[in-house]
Amino acid sequence: MYTLKFPFRLAIGQEVGEDEALTTSGNLQLSLSTNGPYYVMTVQGFPSEQEGRDYLSRVWAGLMWLLLSRELSTTSALEPQPVAYAEDPNKAAENLSKSFGLPIDGPVDGLIDGSRPAVYPTSKRLRTITGGEVSVKITTPRASVLAALAEGSSFPRSAQLIRDDKLRVAFELYGAYFTESSSNARFLTLVMSLEALAIGTARPTLVLELLDGWKKQVEQIMSEGQLSTDEVASLESLNRELLFRREDSIRRQIFNLVLSTFQSANDTDAEKLAHRAKSLYDLRSKLVHEGKLPEKTLTMAVSDAKALVQRLLRVKYLGCVS
């Protein structure tokens, strides 16, 4: 049998409690422990090493469910490390003891990096090397964290979630909200999470025909020559802009994203939430172009954007894994 160790860190100010946490998911046994600055999810019961490696995509889904359901933002590596095993476990223990000046009990079959995932035979006795740090934290019960990780990992299609590149970026941006130190950065990060999910749609035929006509005029002027370097650069930029304008504005794309997402979930607030998303994007534009929003407006915008993004990502998440 094989074991997976998956280390992750929480955002500054967040902490998991010291209570014992054990659970099962199908034929697998899950536990959560600490190792220096890392929390380590240990999953035992894999028939093969490859199955342990494949489970990493489910662990990522568990982390995103933890973010949605417990508001705990994590950072972690997803690529499993190669594990080198000692030819002489007793000699390896002796060498480690000398190197670190600490007594090492029993044989040591190998060393692993405590900051990266590892899959190894359960019978092997491995030592972990990692560092540590201290910070002020808000505690969440360990059993609650493990329950969310287990639930998120066990949805029927949890393994598929990580393959949705746009959704993955949106989750990463939402997670970054919890690590940003300023209200401006938190608000912009939340809106970017919506932008990452927005999908361009073509404008009405009349608008497309106008754009095509302007594009031909630009190309004709450029083909006639006798233009300065600055004029050529500006016309090339305009040509690219006209191509970009064939799709709806990002503002409209976000409106459609929110409306269609919540309508698909039969949410009666779909239209209201879509209009709110459009208003939030307008505030984002004002912040970016003017560099400042009134403090009260910004505080309300951050709160509204967080609630909206979390609610939308939850619908997207459940739609993907269920």
Image: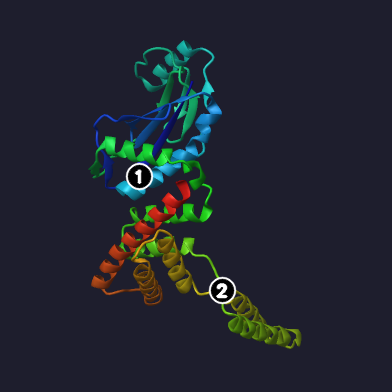
N-terminal label among 1 and 2: 1
| Viewer-closest of 24 and 99 | 24
Residue holding disc 2: 247
User: As displayed, is residue 208 above or below residue 316?
Assistant: below
SS class of the residue under badge 1?
helix
Judging from the image, the colouring scheme is rainbow
Q: Residue lying furthest right in this view?
A: 224
Q: Amino acid at mark 2?
A: Glu
Q: Position of residue 217 (x, y in %)?
A: 69, 87
Q: Residue at x 36, y 41 (%)?
A: 9
User: As displayed, is residue 290 above or below residue 112?
Assistant: below
Q: Position of residue 184 (x, y in %)?
A: 33, 66
Q: Residue at x 47, y 16 (%)?
A: 92
Instruction: Say whether residue 296 is left or right of residue 251.
Output: left
Residue holding disc 1: 66
Instruction: Say whether residue 225 is left or right of residue 34.
Output: right
Q: Is residue 231 visible?
A: no
Category of crowding for the residue at label 2, using alpha-carbon neighbours closer than 10 angstroms: few (below 14), some (14–19), many (at least 20): some
Instruction: Say whether residue 196 is left or right of residue 213.
Output: left
Question: Gap between marks 1 and 2, in whole Å?
Answer: 35 Å
| Viewer-closest of 197 and 89 | 197
Q: Is residue 34 visible?
A: yes
